[in-house]
Image (cartoon, rainbow, N blue to C red):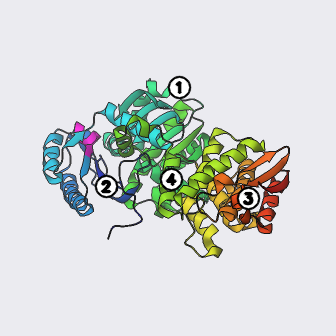
């Protein structure tokens, strides 16, 4: 029996990433604009821990990596993977015994391994940001175990790609585990780097497992309400102060250090040191954590031009709409129905807010299988924590809040304080308006397609008018009118329902 909760994309695809610190397998549902992982496993082999001092991949690390690759190959077979890409980064390209390891690894994997140049690694990291951040405009920094890649990104344009020997393992090795020596190395390597010259006042996009570990620690220490790593933002000042704290003290003494894996903790100080000096040198507006990097950049590079142009948030919302809604076609009709309502309403809506509203319409019915009393809560939790990309945390909260209001009603006190904390007054107001509009739409249409195109709702001559074509006139009711009046009050209009 085929799984009904999977998209019909054919056999899954997979990437094995042989990094300087970790070796990771990710199996994806398919090659799409918003690829969904269906299996993810990593082994911290530490291939690059001695490359700078000895020029060699450590023998025990090689054995660990080859064992992991054998398991990964078997896992690919279990999943029925037909297309497998294997890439290797800094440690493998720099070590004298790197070619011998790659040859052995290719035999184990049964696939060719692409040893990425520093420039190519930097480009793929940046393409990962392009694939998962809405209209990126800043400096991308990918901190691995062996190297740091820096790229200037403006929309889809990449420039000044550079790779530096400042990965956590490499820096610890070069400095003989001395943070003072490591700081001198960081200053020397960053001096005159073109990629950081134009970063002032723009975001710095932080990619890499150790920086994500730092961000996870920051989330737990500050009590931040959403434990989603992608697009987690820290002000430049806070990032600087937190980095100084982490590199100054023994990691084991830090509050909530248990949220960081034991194997990552020795590298935290080096990652913090690099981040501190980058923030000082670049003077970014904020630090944005990305869960996407080389692997996702590689997948993005394989898409055709039409797929690349798709909005990743809307692509992901359409997939969930297809998998979980009673009628996916109704979700698409709701997008168009709400487009017409907003265009007539006089309510100001930015391009950013429009795409959030459209995503919310596509996701409005994904909780329908839950008990009616819990549909709002379940939908909110799914949306707030889903593996979406192309959306920031306030955007997640808006989408989740809108769908919550659609199910529960417009009582603000019922909305999770954690979600509310992420919303500006403007976004909260828009979420309530959209939730109220969806309550009208779902009551009229019963979540079925073919109704909303014939029951438009617009603001006309200062009144909010719901027009039911004559053949749909029997769908009118006092309850529908009550919900229409509720929405009308929110936007300062009078309500009218007509049948014609």
Name the residue that disc number 1 marks: 198
Q: CA distance from mark 4 to mark 3?
A: 22 Å
Local packing at callout 1 (Cα closer than 10 Å; few below 14, some 14-19, many 20+) is some
Proximity of marks 4 and 1: CB atoms separated by less than 8 Å: no
Cα distance in 3D space between marks 4 and 2: 18 Å
Looking at the image, residue 284 sits to the left or right of residue 181; the answer is right
Q: Which residues are magenta?
A: 86-93
Q: Which mark is residue 35?
A: none
- Going from N to C along the chain, the mark reached first, 4 or 1, is 1
Q: Left or right: 102 with respect to 177?
A: left
The relative height of residue 302 versus residue 263 in the rendered view (above or below) is above
Q: Read off the residue under disc 3.
A: 436
The kind of secondary structure element at disc 2 is: loop
User: Nearest the camera: 57 or 188?
Assistant: 57
First in residue order: circle 2 vs circle 1: 2
Question: From mark 4 to mark 1, how far is it between C-alphas?
Answer: 37 Å
Q: Can the viewer see residue 37 in this picture?
A: yes
Q: Is residue 60 above or below residue 378?
A: above
Q: Position of residue 285 (x, y in %)?
A: 60, 36
Q: Secondary structure at mark 3?
A: helix
Q: Which residue is mark 2?
A: 10
Checking the image for residue 318, the label placed there is 4
């Amino acid at each position: 029996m085929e799984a009904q909760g999977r998209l019909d994309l054919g056999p899954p695809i997979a990437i094995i990433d042989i990094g300087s610190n970790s070796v990771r397998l990710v199996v994806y549902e398919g090659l799409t604009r918003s690829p969904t992982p269906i299996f993810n496993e990593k082994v911290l082999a530490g291939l690059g821990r001695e490359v700078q001092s000895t020029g060699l991949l450590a023998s025990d690390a090689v054995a660990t990596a080859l064992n992991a690759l054998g398991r990964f190959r078997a896992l690919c077979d279990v999943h029925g993977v037909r297309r497998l890409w294997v890439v290797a980064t800094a440690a493998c390209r720099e070590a004298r015994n790197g070619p011998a390891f790659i040859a052995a690894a290719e035999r184990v994997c049964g696939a060719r391994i692409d040893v990425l140049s520093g420039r190519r690694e930097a480009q793929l990291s940046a393409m990962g940001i392009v694939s998962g951040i809405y209209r990126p405009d800043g400096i991308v920094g990918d901190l691995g175990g062996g190297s740091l890649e820096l790229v200037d990104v403006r929309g889809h344009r990449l420039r000044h790609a550079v790779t530096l020997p400042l990965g956590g393992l490499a820096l610890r090795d070069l400095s003989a585990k001395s943070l003072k020596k490591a700081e001198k190395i960081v200053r020397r390597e960053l001096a005159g780097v073109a990629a950081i010259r134009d970063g002032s006042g723009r975001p710095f996009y932080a990619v890499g497992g150790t920086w994500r570990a730092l961000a996870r620690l920051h989330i737990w220490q500050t009590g931040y309400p959403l434990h989603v790593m992608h697009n987690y933002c820290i002000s430049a000042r806070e990032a600087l102060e937190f980095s100084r704290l982490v590199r100054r003290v023994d990691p084991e003494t830090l509050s909530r250090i248990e949220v960081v894996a034991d194997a990552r903790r020795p590298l935290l100080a080096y990652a913090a040191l690099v981040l501190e000096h980058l923030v000082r040198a670049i003077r970014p507006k904020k630090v944005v954590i990305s869960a996407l990097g080389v692997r996702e950049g590689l997948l993005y590079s394989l898409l055709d031009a039409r797929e690349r142009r798709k909005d990743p948030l809307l692509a992901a919302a359409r997939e969930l709409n297809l998998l979980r809604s009673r009628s996916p076609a109704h979700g698409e009709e709701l997008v168009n129905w709400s487009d017409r309502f907003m265009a007539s309403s006089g309510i100001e809506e930015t391009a950013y807010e429009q795409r959030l509203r459209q995503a919310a319409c596509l996701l409005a019915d994904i909780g329908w299988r839950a008990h009616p009393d819990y549909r709002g809560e379940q939908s909110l939790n799914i949306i707030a924590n889903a593996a979406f990309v192309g959306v920031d945390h306030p955007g997640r909260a808006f989408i989740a809040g809108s769908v919550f209001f659609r199910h529960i009603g417009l009582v603000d006190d019922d909305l999770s304080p954690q979600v509310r904390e992420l919303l500006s007054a403007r976004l909260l107001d828009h979420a309530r308006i959209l939730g109220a509009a969806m309550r009208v739409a779902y009551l009229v249409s019963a979540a079925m397609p073919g109704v909303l195109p014939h029951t438009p709702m617009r603001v006309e001559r200062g009144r909010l008018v719901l027009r039911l074509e004559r053949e749909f006139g029997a769908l009118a009711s006092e309850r529908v009118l009550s919900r229409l009046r509720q929405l009308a009050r929110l936007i300062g209009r009078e309500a009218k329902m007509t049948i014609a």
